[in-house]
Image (tube, coloured by chain):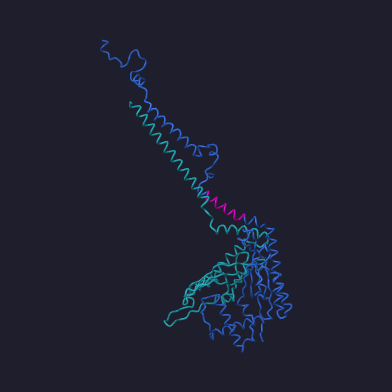
Amino acid sequence: MASLIEQPDFDEHASVPRQVQEVQELPPAPRWFKVVCGICWVVVLVSIAGVFFFTPAFSAPSEAAETTDEETPNVEEVESAALDSEVAEATAAIQNNLSAEDAEAISNDAYDLAQQIASAQANARTNMYDEELYDEWIKKLQELLPEAPNQAVVWYTPSNDTEFSWDTFQPYIFEADKVSAAEPAVRVLWLARLEDGTVLSWARALYDANSSAFVDFERGITSEGYALIPIDREEFESEDDALLSDMQETIKGLQDLNPVLPDEEEVTEEQKQDAFALREANREKNGVSFE
Amino acid sequence: MNRPRWIALIVSIVIGIFAITWFVVTIMTRTAEANALIEAEQAESVPEEVVESAQNQALSEISEEATGISQSKIDEDREVIEEVAKLIYSWSTGDEYRENRQALIDKYNIPEDSSLLVNFMPPLVATTDSDGEVVDEVSELKLHSEFVSLEPYVVGITDDGYDYYCIVTSSSSDTNGATAEGESALACHVDSSGNISDVTATTFIG
């Protein structure tokens, strides 16, 4: 009976199944197996450590937790920060080189000097026919314009009976590139105006605070101002010749200004009549006579 | 070597390869990011006009504090003056000239009999040529004028605004392609609401 009963496949004296016994009884792993497996797992551990080391969120979890997404720098933010930094540097150069107090002092100094020049201009022009006084005022202009000696001349010479004044205005246009280079400079404008405000001539220059002098002069005469400039009649045989010369000068000036004007050396009869009428009208309007 | 050991060996090798790959990819990614940041810091530079604008803004604030002349008003007024200057100086056909002239009348209320519209920008006279075509001087000579820039100077301060005298730079060309830049003057008043009036312009000679 007992032989008919299937016996379980284990040693009745053993405490574990046979298969387990077989595993437990595996022969020891070969050395190369242990070395390869060991190397693999060392590589795994080193790689994981490396990844953790190179990933900020893992390497400094406390700091990462405090850092919001907005604070995490990315390329766009770094670019923006770099641009902001460049702009900030540029504006700081301005602010470091020019305070509001300095700007006020420079502006006032420029205005005072500009007024002295305007006054000297008026006096030199008034005394053009008194050699001694004229020389005196030209000398004064030279003293006032040490950095621009070629500007120490009478800027605008209309007919004697033209009453105009050289006006100066409070300077306020500081030059950014000069100020950032620690050479504070402010632009000044002079206008030669009739009593009704008609501008006859203008001049502008840069007041350099370092040398306390004007540089970079530009001057011009308006078409209204040009009409009031007398010509030396002694050079011409007749009034018509004088007028013709005047017109040719006018046309030459216009051609210099605007090349689209026809390049004609001869003044046409029609142009002559028109210009003559306009010039006479201007002179009449301003009470100027050359008789 | 039996089967379980082979499996253990293969699993170890696969995991090892995966770990190395992960590590290498991580290093490459971090290096690329770091390089990008360095390049971003070094290579980018602010456009010149942005720096200039920031500098001008800083100077405007200093200048306003020093002189009492409102730079913000000047900046606003300058935009209006430039709009008008562009209408006066920028045209390339007879039609454009006429449109600009009409815009000065309609939009800026400059009287048609003002000195500006009578002397400086007179009505364009159209004539009929020998072929019966209606032509005007601007189109016929292919005259072209373009506003370039202006520098406004405050020459008067009234209760309701500023008086300006502006030195305008413009360029012009003709049918031969000859071009030149020249300066002229534009005077005007801009009130506190930004309305422009008393616009006059004049050429310079010599």
Residue in the image at 35% along x and 14% along y = A14
Q: What x and y, as percent, mark residue A70?
A: 53, 45
The quarter of the image holding the N terminus of chain A is top left
Q: Which chain is blue?
A: A
Decide: is B39 above or below B131.
Answer: above
Is any part of residue B161 visible from this angle?
A: no
* Between B165 and A124, the one nearer to me in the picture: A124
Q: Residue furthest top?
A: A1
Residue A284 relative to residue A260: left or right: right
Is any part of residue B34 visible from this angle?
A: yes
**Residue A80 part of the magenta-drawn span:** yes
Q: What x and y, as percent, mark residue B36?
A: 49, 48
* Between A209 and A148, the one nearer to me in the picture: A148
Prevailing secondary structure of the magenta residues: helix
Q: Residue furthest front?
A: A31
Residue in the image at 60% along x and 67% along y = B151
Q: Where is residue B149, by image quadrant?
A: bottom right
Decide: is B169 above or below A162.
Answer: above
The quarter of the image holding the C terminus of chain A is bottom right
* Between A147 and B104, the one nearer to me in the picture: A147
Decide: is A14 above or below A137.
Answer: above
Q: Residue furthest bottom?
A: A237
The stretch in magenta equals A78-92
Residue A33 relative to residue A65: left or right: left
Q: What x and y, as percent, mark residue A18?
A: 33, 18
Q: Which chain is cyan?
A: B
**Residue A109 part of the magenta-drawn span:** no
Q: Where is residue A166, by image quadrant?
A: bottom right
Q: How many marks?
A: 0
Decide: is B113 above or below B51.
Answer: below
Q: What x and y, as percent, mark residue B2?
A: 33, 26
